[in-house]
Image: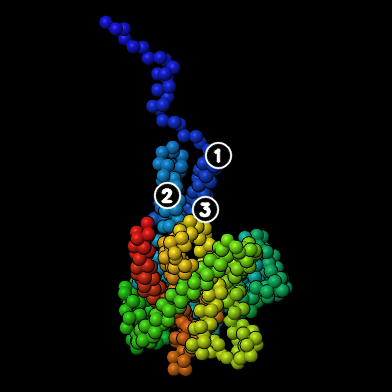
């Protein structure tokens, strides 16, 4: 019988050591990243909790606490390594992409805008405050403007009783120990800093804006040294849910967010309500909007495609020229070519606008022409495309340069050996490989230029405008057209603007999805 084999202890130890997984080494970068993320989470919690508690936003408070707890558990644990890298990006995606989209849609189903910014109670307060009128026999006070804990308040002296009261937006409160001057005005009071005449004059608008509520109405400043109590001519009556006053009663309409009288008139101050799909219906049925929509959309599509194609063509041409092995001074050329990209876009757009000026513009001075470039539809459209080309081609030049450096030169050399000339080698080898790498960026550039508000607003402001149609200009994009419809009439209609923004978002999303789908097919062909 053979003796049992004995495993050498060192070999056994080595085998167990090999079977046991290697312990992950904790690097300094990992520790710093963990501490930084936890610090941001803690700062977010500490910063957000007090205002959320004060506003009684319990749902938002619960979300902040839950997110902070998840981040703390995730980064204090040795587990869930992939999640440590995915969670921050996901949070930022939700905060800066998903939430704004959802907020825009939620706004689009409301009447939010000028006259409809607050609640019904705030609307009632504003209506009553705006209807204040002084009536004969109403109380009058000596006024001294003062500050208390940094807040501007009134120190009001009753001429008959010499009693001093503090007047603020919270109402009246007695003041003890005040010192009165010869005219009866307060010159000093414990806890208050009385403003001098010059200081009060400098804050005259703030003083005039203060309304001190009282039982019979409200106290308003009448100059800098006198205040009077006024009565509200429009008063809310809870029994009928209406405003009692001139031409009233004004019944509350929860459907429109207005107070309406029997004649159908409305008070200018309303409140925010849900209007459902009314804003979307207005976009599709209002003839002043939908008659111009197709024309604006066609130019918008032309502008976005033209901007992408021209900037890509010029950027790629310059990148190919500098990519040639015999090219000298490449670094200097690259620095000069990216200067338009490094300049502030808004400043460059304003400079280009002045360059195209008919009377003193540089373009006409250099060419000897008298063309009104921005005053005619065709030349204005060519001008904005040229300006966008100048601003956009450096970006395409940079990304194309990077993509060219990733294409092996052996491929083009092999094409030359097979008898292909330079054009065929570019068309059959270089361009397809460039498009595989750059197609997603081209789609993103199209989406950006489709909503390129600055390029139009700062150069032509959407013009030139036809005499018969001042609502829409020859160079208007959907985004500038929306801006004029929602904010150009002197009042802001955020709900309506959000509804049109949803339409624009849907159009861009569909076109981008089609573009990305074609990109994936192209990648499959050249993979």
Give the residue number, with chain letter if any, for mark 2.
86
Residue drawn 62% across the image and 60% down it: 149
Is any atom of residue 469 visible in this view? yes
In percent of width and height, residue 144 lies at 65, 71
Counting residues from the N terminus, which is met first, the one under dot 3 or under dot 1?
1
| Tag 2–tag 1 contact (CB < 8 Å) | no
Residue 47's label in the rendered image is 3
In percent of width and height, residue 5 lies at 33, 11
In the figure, 396 relative to 93: above or below? below
| Tag 3–tag 2 contact (CB < 8 Å) | no
Distance from the alpha carbon under mark 3 to that under mark 1:
28 Å
In percent of width and height, residue 45 lies at 49, 50
Residue drawn 58% across the image and 81% down it: 353
The residue most toward the left is 1
Quadrant of the image occupied by residue 59: bottom left
Counting residues from the N terminus, which is met first, the one under dot 2 or under dot 1?
1
Task: Determine whether the residue tagged by mark 1 lies in a helix, strand or loop.
Answer: helix
Q: Nearer the viewer, mark 3 or mark 2?
A: 2
Task: Determine whether the residue tagged by mark 3 lies in a helix, strand or loop.
Answer: helix
Is any atom of residue 444 visible in this view? no
Task: Determine whether the residue tagged by mark 2 lies in a helix, strand or loop.
Answer: helix
Residue drawn 36% across the image and 12% down it: 6
Quadrant of the image occupied by residue 114: bottom left
Q: Name the side, left or right, on which 306 lies relative to 340.
A: left
Crowd around label 1: few <14 · some 14–19 · many ≥20 (10 Å): few
Residue drawn 44% across the image and 64% down it: 419
Give the residue number, with chain letter if any, for mark 1.
28
Q: Nearer the viewer, mark 3 or mark 1?
A: 1
């Amino acid at each position: 019988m053979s003796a049992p084999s004995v495993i050498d202890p060192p070999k056994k130890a080595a085998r167990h050591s090999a079977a046991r997984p290697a312990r992950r080494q904790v690097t300094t970068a990992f520790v710093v990243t963990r501490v930084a993320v936890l610090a941001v989470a803690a700062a977010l919690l500490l910063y957000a909790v007090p205002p959320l508690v004060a506003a009684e936003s319990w749902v938002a408070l619960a979300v902040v606490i839950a997110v902070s707890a998840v981040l703390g558990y995730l980064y204090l644990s040795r587990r869930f390594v992939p999640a440590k890298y995915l969670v921050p990006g996901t949070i930022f995606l939700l905060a800066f992409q998903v939430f704004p989209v959802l907020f825009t849609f939620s706004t689009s189903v409301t009447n939010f805008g000028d006259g409809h910014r607050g609640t019904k109670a705030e609307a009632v307060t504003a209506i009553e405050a705006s209807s204040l009128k002084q009536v004969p026999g109403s109380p009058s006070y000596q006024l001294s403007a003062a500050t208390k804990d940094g807040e501007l308040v009134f120190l009001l002296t009753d001429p008959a009783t010499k009693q001093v009261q503090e007047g603020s937006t919270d109402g009246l409160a007695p003041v003890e120990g005040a010192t009165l001057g010869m005219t009866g005005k307060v010159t000093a009071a414990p806890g208050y800093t009385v403003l001098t005449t010059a200081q009060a004059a400098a804050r005259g608008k703030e003083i005039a804006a203060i309304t001190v509520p009282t039982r019979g109405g409200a106290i308003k400043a009448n100059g800098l040294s006198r205040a009077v109590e006024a009565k509200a001519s429009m008063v809310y009556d809870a029994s009928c849910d209406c405003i009692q006053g001139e031409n009233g009663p004004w019944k509350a309409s929860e459907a429109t967010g207005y107070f309406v009288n029997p004649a159908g008139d409305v008070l200018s101050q309303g409140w925010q309500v849900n209007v459902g799909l009314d804003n979307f219906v207005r976009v599709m049925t209002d003839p002043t909007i939908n008659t111009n929509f197709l024309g604006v959309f066609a130019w918008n599509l032309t502008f976005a495609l033209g901007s992408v194609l021209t900037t890509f063509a010029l950027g790629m041409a310059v990148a190919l020229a500098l990519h040639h092995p015999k090219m000298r001074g490449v670094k200097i050329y690259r620095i000069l070519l990216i200067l338009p990209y490094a300049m502030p876009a808004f400043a460059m757009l304003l400079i280009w606008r002045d360059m195209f000026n008919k009377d003193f513009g540089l373009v006409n001075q250099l060419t000897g022409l008298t063309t009104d470039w921005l005053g005619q539809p065709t030349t204005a459209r060519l001008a904005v495309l040229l300006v966008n080309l100048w601003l956009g081609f450096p970006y395409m030049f940079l990304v194309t340069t990077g993509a060219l450096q990733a294409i092996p030169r052996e491929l083009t050399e092999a094409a030359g050996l097979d008898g292909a000339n330079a054009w065929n080698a570019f068309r059959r080898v270089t361009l397809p490989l460039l498009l595989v790498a750059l197609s997603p960026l081209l789609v993103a550039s199209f989406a950006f230029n489709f909503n390129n508000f600055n390029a139009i607003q700062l150069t032509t402001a959407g013009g030139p405008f036809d005499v018969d149609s001042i609502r829409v200009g020859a160079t208007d994009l959907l985004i500038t057209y929306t801006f004029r419809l929602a904010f150009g009439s002197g009042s802001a209609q955020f709900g309506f603007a959000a509804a049109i923004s949803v339409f624009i978002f849907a159009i861009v999303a569909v076109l981008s999805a089609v573009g990305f789908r074609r990109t994936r097919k192209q990648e499959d062909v050249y993979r």
